Amino acid sequence: MTVRVQSGEGAALAHANRLVWGVHLAVAALLLLLQFVLPPFHHGMLARIMVLASYAIGYNLLLGYTGLMSLGHAMFFAAGMYGTGLTVYYLGFGALPAIVTGLLASIAVALVIGWITLRTTGVSFLIVTMMFAQAFFLATLYFNRITGGDQGLVLAGRLPPLHLGPLTLNLAQPGVKYNVALVVFTACVLLGLWLVRSPAGRVLVAIRENEERARLIGYNTFHYKWLTLTISGAVSGLAGSTYTLLFSYLGSSFASILYSIYPLLWTLVGGVGTIIGPLVGATMMTYVVDITSGYTTAYLIVVGAALVILIMRFPQGIMGAVRARWPQWVP
Amino acid sequence: MGPVSPLLETVNLEKWFGGLRAVHSVDFRLERGEIRAIIGPNGAGKTTFVSMICGRIPPTSGRVIFKGREITRVPAHARVGLGIAYTFQLVSIFRNLTVYENVALAVQRRLVRHSLDAIKDNPRALTAEVEGALAEVEFSPPDDRPAGTLAHGHQRLLEVAMALALHPELLILDEPTQGLAPEEIAGLGALIRRITGNVTVLLIEHNMEVVLGLSQRVTVMNWGDIIAEGTPQEIEANPEVQRVYLGQ
C-alpha cells in the first residue's frame, strides 16, 4: 500500500497528475510569498489558520475519502496538544521530541478509538466518536492538577529554542511561527495528496461509494478504514501539537465538542473530499469571524447568515464548486 | 490417490434469520469446470445459500469447503483472494466512479496480491489489465461518464468484467440476466460459455431457456432445501420439480 500509481490512460493523465501536484505546491508557494506582503497582524492570523487547516485536512481524510463523519476529532487534536505541551511543561522537552510524543499520543488514541468505533457507521459512528471525545474532555478537566483543566497551562518561557543545524529558531517570533506553520501545513497537504492518489486512496473512495462491493472485490475494508482513521488522527494530533508550540498554550477548551465541530464546518465550507478545501474553509471562517466581530457583538448572526448563503449556493463547498468545473485539478 | 476433491463443498450448511430457517442443512458439491444453475421459487433460499459461499453472510451452522480447505470462518474479502467472485442480484458497482476506476479497483486487488512491483514500476500494467478485462466481456465504455449513468445492461456487464478481472476460480452470478434485453441475454450466455474452462460458474437463474442452454447440471431449491439435482433434461422431467417450480 505504499506504492503510488497513476490512474488513467497514458500521457494525458501523467500531465493531469503533474498538474494536481503543481496546483497544491503553488498554494504552498503562495503562502510562502504572502508573508512578505502582508502586514504583521495577518502573520499571526495566517499562522493560526494554517495550523487549523492542517487539522481540517486530517479530518477531511476520514470524512471526504471514506465517508465517515466523526464528531470526536478534538480528542486527537487534544491528544497531540497534551502529548506535546505536558512534556514541555513538566519534562522540559524541546520542540522536536515534544512533537514526536504528541504524534505518538494521537496515534495511540486513534488506534484504540478506531478499533472500537469503526464497528459502527453513519449516525452511530458520529455518536460513538462524540461520546469518547466527551469522556476525553471530562478527563482533561478531572485531572486538572496535571492538565490545568479549563484554565490550561502556559508554556511561555519554558520552551527551549529549536536548533536545526546552524539555525536557532525561537518559536515565539512571528516570522518563525509563520514558517513553522507553513512547513507543517505543506507536509499535511503532501501527505494527504499522496494518500488519496495512492492505490490505497482509490480503495478509500471505493469504500465511501459502496463498502459492500469493495469488500466483495477483496478489500479488507475495516483495515483500510482503521488505517485512514489513524492517519487522520495523527495529522489532527500534529496540528494540535504544533498549535501548542506556536501559541504557548494548552487547555481543555481544545478538547471540547466545539473543536470537534470546527473541522467539520471548515471542511463543509471549503469542500468535502478536496485537499485544499479545508484551508479555504478555515481561512474564510476565521476571517469572517474576525472582521464581523470588529463591527458588532452580534457577529454570530452574520456568520450564520454567511454559512446559510454558502450552503445554498455551493452545497459541495467552495472547492467542490471549483472542482465541478476543472475536474482533474482538485483531488 | 483417493477421489479428487470437488472445487466447492458445503456440509450441513444452515441459516436462520430469527425464527425463519432460510437454508436447511444443505449438502452440496460443485466440480471444477462446471456451469451449475440453481433454480427455485422466490424465497427458496438461493441467494442466502450462495451468500454463505462467498462469505457475505455467516452461516448459523455447517461448513463451507473450497479447494479442500475449510473456509467457513474466512471473511468475504479473503475468499476473493482464494478465488471466489460474486456478482449481486441487484447490480452493485461504484456508481459515481468511471468504468475505468471500477475495473481498476478489481485489477489492483489482484496485482497487489501477487506483486506490488507490478503496479509500482509500471502503472500502464494496470491500464492494460483494465482494457483486457473490458475486452473479455466485449464492452467498450462510451466515455468517462460515471458508471451509474450507463444503461442497465452495460452496468451488469461491467460488474461481470470486475468479477473476471479478479481471475476467480469460482464465479457466482446471482440472477445475471434479470432486466436484460433478449440480445443481451444471448451475449451473456456466450460470454459464460467462453470463460468456462478457466472458471467454474455457479449461477442463480430464473430464465429457464438460459438454464437449459448453459448448465451441465441443475440444482433445485425449495423452502431452504435442495429437492432435486441432475442434468437439465432430468430436472425438466422430474415430477416434483414440475409441481413446485415449473408449474406444470
Image (tube, rainbow, N blue to C red):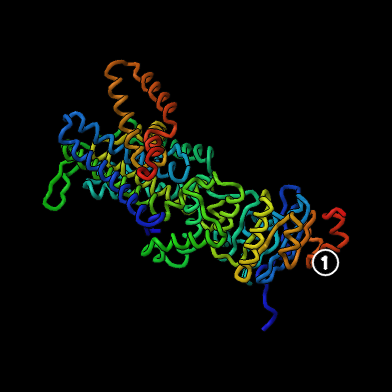
Give me the residue at 71% from left, 68% from top. B29
Which of the chains bears the disc numbered 1? B
Q: Disc 1 residue type? A: Glu
Which residue sits furthest bottom?
B1
Give me the residue at 82% from left, 66% from top. B234
Q: Position of residue A164 (x, y in %)?
A: 16, 51
Q: Position of residue B157 (x, y in %)?
A: 59, 54
Neighbour class for label 1 at 10 Å: few (<14), some, many (≥20)? some
Instruction: Give the quadrant of residue A149.
Output: top left
Q: Position of residue A33 (x, y in %)?
A: 18, 39
Which residue sits furthest front?
B183
Given residues A310 and A223, the one toward you in this image is A310
Give me the residue at 63% from left, 52% from top. B88
Left or right: B118 in relation to A80:
right
Which residue sits furthest left?
A166
User: In this orientation, does residue A125 appear?
Assistant: yes
Instruction: Tell how many labels.
Output: 1
Given residues B226 and B233, the one toward you in this image is B233
- Say if A10 sits above or below B216 in the image: above
Q: Position of residue B167 (x, y in %)?
A: 55, 65
Left or right: B69 in relation to A184:
right
Give me the residue at 21% from left, 30% from top. A42
User: In this orientation, does residue A142 appear?
Assistant: no
- Say if A58 sits above or below B51 in the image: above
Quadrant where the N terminus of chain B sits is bottom right
Quadrant where the C terminus of chain B sits is bottom right
Which residue corresponds to mark 1?
B234
Given residues A62 and B115, the one toward you in this image is B115
Is label 1 in a helix, a strand or a loop? helix
Instruction: Give the quadrant of residue A57.
Output: top left
